[in-house]
Structures are given as C-alpha cells and as structure tokens.
Image (cartoon, helix red, strand yellow):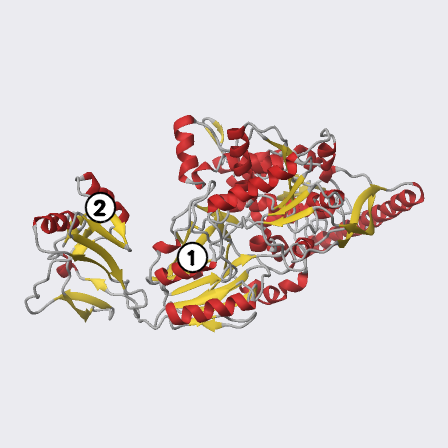
Amino acid sequence: MGTSVQVTPLCGVYNENPLSYLVSIDGFNFLVDCGWNDHFDPSFLQPLARVASTIDAVLLSHPDTLHLGALPYAMKQLGLSAPVYSTEPVYRLGLLTMYDQYLSRKQVSEFDLFTLDDIDSAFQNVTRLTYSQNYHLFGKGEGIVIAPHVAGHLLGGTVWKITKDGEDVIYAVDFNHRKERLLNGTVLESFVRPAVLITDAYNALNNQPSRRQRDQEFLDVILKTLRGDGNVLLPVDTAGRVLELMLILEQYWTQHHLNYPIFFLTYVASSTIDYVKSFLEWMSDSIAKSFEHTRDNAFLLKHVTLLISKSELEKVPDGPKIVLASMASLEAGFSHDIFVEWATDAKNLVLFSERGQFATLARMLQADPPPKAVKVTMSKRVPLVGEELAAYEEEQERIKKEEALKASLSKEEEMKASRGSDNKLGDPMVIDTTTPPASSDVAVPHVGGLRDILIDGFVPPSTSVAPMFPFYENSSEWDDFGEVINPEDYVIKDEDMDQATMQVGDDLNGKLDEGAASLIFDTTPSKVISNELTVQVKCMLVYMDFEGRSDGRSIKSILSHVAPLKLVLVHGSAEATEHLKQHCLKHVCPHVYAPQIGETIDVTSDLCAYKVQLSEKLMSNVLFKKLGDYEVAWVDAEVGKTESGSLSLLPLSTPPPSHDTVFVGDIKMADFKQFLASKGIQVEFSGGALRCGEYVTLRKVGDASQKGGGAIIQQIVMEGPLCDEYYKIREYLYSQYYLL
C-alpha cells in the first residue's frame, strides 16, 4: 500500500470563499492555508474549529487575507497551536496585511476578533523557508519532507510539495505561468506525475488577452481620465498584486515623463515598500539582473508617494491624481471612504484590478450593468465628551477598584497557602521539648536552606509568621580566582534577543509606520458613530484582470503536462469546478475529485512502496558513471532478506544480462534550435516541428495520458532522407544527451 493521503476541505470549495484544507499524510495533519474574507465572519471557521486541536503543521501559500487571514483568530480562539511554515515574503507581507486589516476596522468599528498582539503571537510561530528548500519534519512527521516552490501569483507565493516515501503531494492554488514585471512564472510544469495534485478551478472559465494588450488598455483608460481632469481610484490589497501595478505605473511615468501624482495609501505603506526593497531575490530575473548591473532597486519609487493616513491625502493640492488604496473589497479601509467621495463625479474613474469577494461592495459595482446607486455605511471614531466622557471615566475607575480588590484577595490567598505549606514542612517556630537542644543557648532548626534564629525561652505569638526575617546561608563555591560562576547564567537566549528586538519598534522587524503606531497608542476615550447613506454612482467603473492567475486554457494545458495520478479540485465557482472536472476526466487522469466542505476523500496512491537495503556485496560491484552533477549506474540484483528480516538487494546468482545504450537527459527544442543555429545550420519552427536544413525535421512527442507511476516517456522523432546532413544533425542531437 502506498502513502496514505486524505483531503478534507474546511472552506473554499464550489465557491470563491477563503481557502483552508486539511491534508492528512500517514496520520500527520497539515492545515494548508488558513484564510478568511473581508467580512471576517466566524461562521466560515466552524469546520476549522472542529479540527484545529488535531493539526500538526500549517502551510501558508500566499500573503493575503484569503490564504492566511484566519491565522491569528484560530490561534487565539480555536486552539490552533501547530508550527507554521511559509516563505520569508509570505511571513513579512502577511504580517503587514493583517496589521492593515486590523487598523482599517478598528477605526470604524469595535473590532474585537483579534488584536495586534494576537497577530504578533500567531506569526512568531512561523518557520521561514526559501524556494526549493527541502525541510525534513521530525517527531510525528518523521520521513515527511516539505518544500516551497514558485507560484508566480504574489511575492513569495508558494506551490507546496510534500514528499513521503518517494510520493509527491502537490498543493498548487492561484499559480501563474506568465512571467511579469515583478515575478517569474510558476515552476508547476516541472513536476511530472505526482501522486496527488490539489489545485483550484477559480479561473477555469476565464480567458485573458496578451499582457501587452492588457497593460496598454490599463494605461489608456487611466490617462484618458487624468487628461479629462478626473481622479483615478484603484482599490488594491495591502502587499500583493498592488506591487505589480506600481511597477507598471512607475515605469510608464518614467519613460513618458508624466507628472500626474500617484499615491499608495495604506496604514503600513512605508513598511511594505521597505520590506519589498529587500526581497529582490524573490522577484523576476529581469529585476535581479538590473540590480546586479546598475544597482538600481526597482522599488526606489520616484513617482509613487507613500501615505499612511487620509489626512495626508487631503493636504494634496486639487488636481487629477491616482490613488492606490486598501482594501480591494471596498468593505473597509481608505478605499471605502475615497469611493464615497469620488463616486458622484462623472469625471472620476474607479478601476478594479481583481474580482471583488462575494457579497462585497466591489463585487456589486462589478456587476453588468453596474448599479446607479448603492447604500453604504460611513463610520468614524470620535473622542468622548461631556456626560459620555464622565460616565466612561467613572466606569474605568470602578474597574480599577475591582481589579485592585481582586489582586489583594489573591495575594492574601497566596499567603495563606504559603503558610499552609510551611506548616506541612514543619513549623520552625515550634521548639521540641522532648529532645534537648544541641546548645542550651541557641537552637537553629533547618528547613531546606532556611535558618530561623530562635532565642531560648522565646515564645512567639500565635499570629506571627516568624520572629525575624528568614536568613539564607550563602553556599556559593570559591576557588583561587574568586567565586565560581555558572556561565549559562550570563548567556542571552535567542528568544530573549528576538523579543527584545521586537520591542524596539523597528519597522523592519514587523512593526508599523510611525503614523500607524500613533493610532494604536492613542488612549483618548472614543466611540464609533455610523450613518447610512445612498451614493449616486456617476463615476466610470472599469474591471481589468490583473489578478496574476493562469487562465482556463493555460490551466488545462499545465494539468495535461503535469498529469497527476490523482487530482483534487478546490476553490472555484460550482460551474467552473464542474467544467474543469469533466475536462480533466477526459484529458488528464481518470481519478478527479471535487469534495464538498467537510467531506474526506481518500487519495492514497495505488502503488506499493517498499524500503530495501543495498548490500555491501552488491555495491562493491556497481560501476558508477558521472553524468553532469550526478552519478548513475545499472544495478542488476535480486531481492532477499537480511538477518533482521528487512528486505535487501543482493547480487544476482547468474550472470547479468547486457543493456542497450540509454540516452539520459531532456532537451528543449528552443534550446536545440539555438545550438544548431550556432553551428551554421538553417533552422526554424514549422507546424510544431523543428525544420533543420532542407530535408530533416525533428518533432518531440509523448503520451501525456499514459497511466501508471512512471514518468512520461518523451521521444524526439527525426525524419528525413539518409544523407550527410541527416547524420550530422543526429550527431549534434546525440551530443545533447548523456550515454549510459
């Protein structure tokens, strides 16, 4: 029997709700993503609450609310205490995302689901990994290896690979195969025939235009609005796709010497960009190479101004401008307030770069046709005055007195308990008259390291604890150099250093901008006032797909190439999920699952895996051949058993058979085309084949629907008449492989 694998969706199947899935591998429970939406509705987390205490590890794939928004609440309220794993950008930017979410709501409501301390506490459990780093679990997870790989959607976004006994479980949601300004494309296509692939159907029904066309349309509609004396609002996330949008605007403004102001407005805008500047190695190859050659950091923004409060934006002179403000859903944050102000002016533009979450204001405005008016709730926090302030202060005074009374009662109970424990040990005040003292002058009874000095004939009152303060004898050791010390008493522990560093308030250790921090430490008594109003939507509303996800056509192509043995579909509308499921059943693999919330499916591999030892006698006769960075060899053996009963590979008792020559390796036709061109051979692609010279054609073929556990066998078919050119090209082709 293969590695046991069960998948249980906790949220985010047959809909676009947050992502959260339980993946159990041989009894070890992974929580893969721990998302929430911008409504922060605890009812979404009921399935998670039932299993939170059984979770052994948490894997986070992206630094946005849909993938990690419930982590602080789950650790505070639901009993989740497992270690968390992510990449460095997911950890840092996810932390800032949750800060921004909390501050955006605390200013307009009595938000109490979690606090900033809860956020810090949750993210302190995160172990950060780099791309392709194999991390070996221990204890209950012994034998399981996890590794993050490039997803291409958000900075630090991850495709998780979980390996046990040679079988791979791949979790790949929200991946993007396209290379963009900020990020390289996903490496999902490099995985072939994994035992289980868990992926989403979010974009299964969508097709996208070319990147160049999309970017040009994006810039055209913005410039048209600005030149018409209008303002542009882009509701964005805190630290996700907004980075790509800023790069597009920054580069275009630099190339065309434009002067229209651009503002990035979140509670953590400055900290976000400070972090991003240090994450160049996580970005696209073009950004990394540009920094190597010119030392120019792509996020030394010259045209984008960072703001952390709406009051700063209000000080900007009137005139056309672009504001990228959180939140993308328009449910809270600066984008909500700015929309209410700008929506009534027909010259303005609200440009959505991603689909709004279900049942949010952004989703309503993206309807076709859009509504002409919407009802919104405007809330703000104001200081208490007059009778309300007096009542608040009176209540606080009453609470302080109650706390002081509780503290005093608690202290008395502790003293009584300590007296009771002293009596159990033996009361040093009681003089035993049945046993004569060692000295008639002074009796010194011992209790542990404590000595109480009693004067003969002294009778203490019954209410006293001791006739004098206890005296502790100094029993330290001395040598020729003085008192002997324990060096460990003077070592500063790593966790103490980390805690001290966090308390300094350094922005680069996960803390807030100065302006945002002032909002937290403002202790002025206040209340939230709200009023509902109807907003006439006269501004232009435009949606353009800058989500950074592969479209339906690309998803199908990638899944056909990966060809998993078993496929699990999650996160997507019911229509999209069923569409992709039927396609995959016909063209990808026969085992496709789309479970409901709470439904556990068993996707255990049908293959049988055995552990065998390679005997020393066998290995002493194996001849290895170096092929690139590896050494390979033919091994002919028979299975036997060792004295302990375990399986072992032993040398054959008969002469081994001869082996045909094997070509080891894989080549890309595009690379081989360049190689032939460098040798002076005229070469071009024609009809999916590589035409070499006048007569020879090369075509790469393979069976992506092949069943079984082996890798897909791909062949290069060479066609053409037998001539000098044919043999020459064949020789060049052989040179691209290792021969074994």
Quarter of the image where one finds residue 638: bottom left
Q: How crowded is mark 1: few (under 14 residues within 10 Å), some or many (20 or more)?
A: some
Is 613 left, or right, of 189 in this rendering?
Answer: left
**Image coordinates for residue 82, horizontal then vertical, percent:** 53, 57
Where is mark 2, residue-wise? 683
Residue at the outermost right position: 387
Q: How crowded is mark 2: few (under 14 residues within 10 Å), some or many (20 or more)?
A: some
Please tell me whether residue 282 is drawn above or below residue 52 in the rendered image: above
Q: Mark 2: which secondary structure?
A: strand
Is 335 left, or right, of 191 in this rendering?
Answer: right
Where is mark 1, residue-wise? 554
Please tell me whether residue 401 is drawn above or below residue 586 in the rendered image: above
Quarter of the image where one finds residue 623: bottom left
Please tell me whether residue 547 is drawn above or below residue 260 in the rendered image: below
Is 593 left, or right, of 315 in this rendering?
Answer: left
Disc 2 and disc 1: Cα gap in Å? 28 Å
User: Which residue is painted at 87% across and 48% down in the image?
Assistant: 395
Contact between marks 2 and 1 (CB within 8 A): the answer is no
Q: What residue type is labelled 1?
A: Ser
User: Which residue is painted at 58% across and 38% down in the image?
Assistant: 272
Please state, as top left, top right, bottom left or bottom right, where the C terminus lies in the image.
Answer: bottom left
Q: Mark 1: which secondary structure?
A: helix
